């Protein structure tokens, strides 16, 4: 199953439909109780508006949709939040947000019947979220122990197979069971490689062969006489890079399938993104203006230094611009002129700076960068010019990030924390390239919603 070109794993699909069943059942039962009370009691106060079944149905739909949105924003359809402390923290936060923003105002506004105390609604809400939290480990246990897995054979270099095995270990529960490993050089002649694959697929316990080849080279293995079967193979043939991209949701930096022409596709949708983000940024500045004024005063009172900090960053098409941030480090933090990555417990960060970094308030002035067109609301984070050349020399495909406007938030930001070394930068680049390759307005919306979790839990802040 795919949504906006993004493959949805079976685990997430199952959890979503079970959530839908639980939420529908609970809200339906509660609505029936309210309707019974509405039919058997009289509202004495004429100033109260009359409760109707239509009103209750609309309230139930809004309530159910808000729960799904809260679960999604807290990452509860991602594998890493399906168990343990992460599950409990995200589930409780989703329940609290839904109660404070939707359920409690709904109850106090009279959308529930007068004879239904708000306390009873709270108990139903707590019971509902308890069930939703318990669903996840049960579904994971089923997929880990009982669900049928794809039995795959890996054909390729030992290094690439190691990457694939790491991906399997990091995606729990996994969808694969590796039953064969064949370490070969996939640069063999086509006929020799077909022979290797035929010999491997004589086994009847293989559902899929995953080969260490670029996607465009897969077609070379198909015979003219039988175009639907690569060299008479009885099983599906795919590439390791495509499989990793679909399951782990990052793209290899050496992937030649990602081109500037592809980045420039969907011009109308990209124009809509540009205009929508400027509008959102304008509304955002007005909405957070009191917060920005408060942060500015706190910085000024802390050490009397400048409020804003301008830093050169590289944007779309290598255009250098000044990114705006609230100053979080002491003055002259890089007096020696040497650019450095921020580190955990960085001594250059001020007292106020530590707080605004933790809450991401230091990045609020970047709404102005969005209005000016330097940045987008969603996209790869902009990097400093001093680092771009160094990183590009070590990571193939890194400059493809510069084919789109950098963003305030992005796919890499919601999937991993702050980067402070080259290994982490490589993984972040892989996530950025996946975003660029699979971009859609729906993916942008999903990233914006899940950024709520990043802000609330201060994930990746330094």
Image: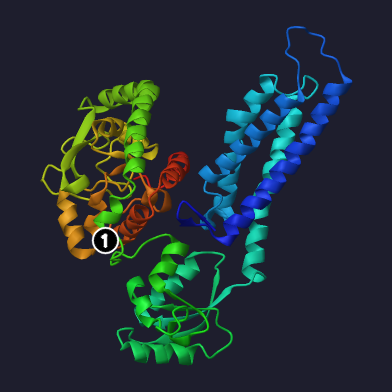
125 in relation to 166, above or below: above
112 or 225: nearer the viewer: 225
| Residue 101 place in picture, x, y as percent | 58, 29
Taking the view exactly as shown, the residue that stands out farthest to the left is 336
Q: Quadrant of the C terminus?
A: top left
Left or right: where does residue 407 sit relative to residue 44?
left
Q: How many numbered marks have been drawn onto this rendered protein structure? A: 1
Residue drawn at x 52%, y 48% as measured from the top left: 75
Name which residue lies at 35% across and 34% down. Answer: 277
Would residue 224 be visible to someone looking at this image? Answer: yes
Q: Nearer the viewer, residue 383 or 216?
A: 216
- Name the quadrant containing residue 319: top left
Compare residues 292 and 277 and report the one nearer the observer.
277
User: Quick check: 87 above or below 146?
Assistant: above
In the visual, does 116 lie left or right of 256? right
Q: Is residue 257 above or below residue 158?
A: above
Residue 420 can be seen, yes or no: no
Residue linked to disc 1:
422
Q: Is residue 269 left or right of residue 142?
A: left
Give the quadrant of the N terminus: bottom right
Q: Residues within 10 Å of mark 1 (few under 14, many from 20)?
A: few
Residue 379 placed where, x, y %? Answer: 33, 46
Up the image or down, 115 lies above or below 193; here it is above
Measured as percent of width and height from the top left, residue 414 is found at 42, 49
């Amino acid at each position: 199953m795919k949504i906006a070109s993004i493959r949805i794993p079976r685990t997430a699909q199952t959890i979503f439909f079970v959530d839908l069943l639980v939420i529908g059942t609970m809200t339906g039962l509660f609505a029936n109780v309210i309707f019974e009370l509405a039919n058997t009691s009289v509202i004495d106060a004429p100033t109260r508006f009359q409760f109707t079944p239509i009103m209750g149905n609309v309230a139930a739909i809004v309530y159910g949709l808000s729960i799904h949105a809260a679960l999604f924003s807290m990452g509860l359809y991602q594998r890493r939040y399906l168990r343990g402390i992460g599950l409990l923290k995200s589930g409780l936060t989703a329940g609290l947000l839904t109660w404070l923003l939707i359920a409690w105002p709904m109850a106090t506004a009279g959308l529930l019947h007068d004879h239904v105390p708000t306390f009873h609604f709270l108990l139903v809400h707590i019971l509902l979220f308890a069930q939703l939290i318990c669903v996840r480990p049960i579904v994971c246990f089923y997929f880990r122990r009982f669900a049928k897995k794809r039995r795959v054979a890996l054909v390729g270099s030992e290094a690439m197979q190691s990457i694939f095995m790491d991906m399997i270990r990091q995606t729990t529960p996994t969808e694969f069971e590796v039953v064969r490993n064949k370490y070969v050089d996939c640069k063999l002649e086509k006929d020799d490689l077909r022979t290797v694959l035929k010999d491997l697929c004589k086994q009847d316990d293989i559902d899929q062969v995953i080969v260490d080849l670029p996607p465009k080279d897969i077609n070379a293995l198909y015979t003219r006489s039988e175009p639907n079967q690569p060299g008479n193979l009885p099983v599906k043939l795919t590439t390791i890079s495509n499989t990793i991209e679909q399951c782990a949701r990052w793209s290899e930096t050496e992937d030649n399938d990602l081109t500037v022409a592809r980045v420039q596709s969907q011009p109308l949708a990209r124009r809509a993104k540009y205009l929508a983000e400027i509008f959102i940024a304008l509304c955002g500045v007005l909405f957070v203006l009191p917060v920005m004024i408060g942060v500015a005063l706190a910085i000024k009172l802390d050490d009397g230094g400048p409020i804003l900090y301008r830093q050169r960053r590289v944007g779309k098409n290598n255009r250098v611009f000044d990114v705006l941030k609230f100053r979080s480090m002491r003055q002259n933090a890089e007096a020696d002129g040497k650019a450095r990555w921020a580190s955990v417990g960085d001594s250059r960060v001020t007292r106020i700076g530590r707080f605004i970094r933790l809450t991401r308030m230091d990045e609020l002035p970047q709404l102005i960068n969005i209005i000016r067109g330097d940045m987008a609301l969603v996209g790869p984070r902009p990097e400093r010019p001093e680092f771009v050349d160094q990183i590009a020399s070590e990571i193939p495909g890194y400059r493809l990030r510069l084919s789109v406007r950098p963003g305030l938030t992005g796919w890499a930001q919601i999937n991993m924390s702050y980067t402070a070394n080259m290994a982490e930068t490589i993984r972040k680049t892989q996530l950025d390239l996946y975003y660029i390759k699979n971009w859609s307005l729906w993916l942008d919306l999903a990233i914006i919603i899940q950024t709520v979790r990043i802000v609330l839990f201060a994930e990746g802040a330094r």
